[in-house]
Amino acid sequence: MTRWRPVAAALVALAAGARVAPAQASSTLLAEGIRAYGNLDLDLAMRLLRAEAARLALTRSSSDERCTALVYLGATALLRGKRDSATAAFQELVSVDPRFRPNRLIFPPQVTTLFEQVRQATKAVVVVAPADTEIATGAGTFRAWVVATSPQAVDITLRYPDGRPFRSLYAGSVADSTLVRWDGLDDAGKPPSVDRVLLRVASYAASGEVAGTVQLPLALRVTDGDTLSWSADPPDSLLLPERAGQGPAGRALLGGAVVSGAVVALPSIVGGTDASSGPRIAVAGTVGITSLVGYFVHRAGRPVPANILANQRARAAWQQRVVTVRAENERRRRGARLAIRAGEPLVDEPRRP
């Protein structure tokens, strides 16, 4: 099961800047501050909530705790007539979580109205992504939500650590939020060859200038699918010789010569006195001619049709196997796994005058 958490927030302040104070979390202070607000002891509530908001910011406590402290701090400041302090608290609040909305059953209309005005004027973006994700490259999807406080133009890209473009994901306006998807591939459609990229979200002011950016480091680890080995041609061990060798022709010629010689020499071997050599010469000649025919029939280099046909069938079967292996390897490559781990955000806010 995927675990989601906010991992980055970029604040683009077009109004006064928000103030973030260092500190350590204390639920007791927060509870006491809320109680003092409820009792309309606004001076005490202001001191407690301001201290608590500072502590929570320093310790990077959960956004829920920080939002609670800041909304009560802003409400307290407004009820005390300190509108600038209330505005600053609400600016910080929307930078922590642009999705936050005050409860209208708890806070009076003047508080919720000021908060809404601050939210619309302060351009803040937060990226909400899973801390750890594993997908199949090209088939799975890494998802991240880009949430905005108010309508604004954004450019969302993946970049190499040195800032060079890696993959464009989205360019356009965000009214409330937009879901960004990445299939784990680069612009060339291949798994990443690096172990780290940056998910960069740039916000644009109405003038078209970059108002602020947030870059979320993504650590990558690719696990390739094992592929099958193959060769374009079948091994020689599967093929038969397609041309006759020297052996059969030589044996036919040698055998004929031996038999012909034996026929001619037969009378002298057995001690015969018959002088008629005509029939023997004819037989010897016939045997010799037969051996010559056998020699030419079995001569070296002569095509062997049966072997050629068998090899054609073997090559066809091998080529079909090659096609099958290629398809399987492609499927396995597409099935490569990509593990993605989100790191700490790198926020670049514009310098305010």
Image (spheres, rainbow, N blue to C red):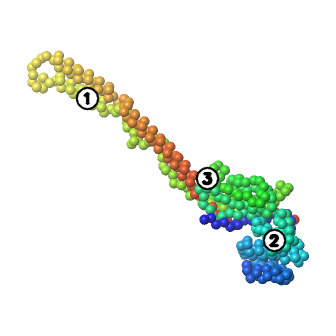
The amino acid beneath tag 2 is: Arg
Q: Residue at x 82, y 74 (%)?
A: 107
In the image, is 243 to the left or to the right of 287? right
Q: Which mark is residue 39?
A: none
Secondary structure beneath dot 3 equals: loop
The amino acid beneath tag 1 is: Leu
State the quadrant of the N terminus. Answer: bottom right
Q: Are marks 2 and 3 in contact (CB under 8 Å)?
A: no
Secondary structure beneath dot 2 equals: loop
Question: Where residue 170 sits in the image (x, y, percent)?
Answer: 73, 54
**Residue highlighted by disc 1:** 254
Of tags 2 and 3, the one toward the viewer is 2
What is the distance, in whole Å, between disc 1 and disc 3 at their CAs? Answer: 69 Å
Crowding near the residue tagged with mark 1, few <14, some 14–19, many ≥20 C-alpha atoms within 10 Å: some
Q: Residue at x 60, y 58 (%)?
A: 135
Q: Are marks 2 and 1 in contact (CB under 8 Å)?
A: no
**Residue highlighted by disc 2:** 104
What is the distance, in whole Å, between disc 2 and disc 1 at their CAs? Answer: 114 Å
Q: Which mark is residue 138?
A: 3
First in residue order: circle 1 vs circle 3? 3
What is the distance, in whole Å, between disc 2 and disc 3 at their CAs? Answer: 45 Å
Residue 91, quarter of picture:
bottom right
Residue 209, quarter of picture:
bottom right
Crowding near the residue tagged with mark 2, few <14, some 14–19, many ≥20 C-alpha atoms within 10 Å: few
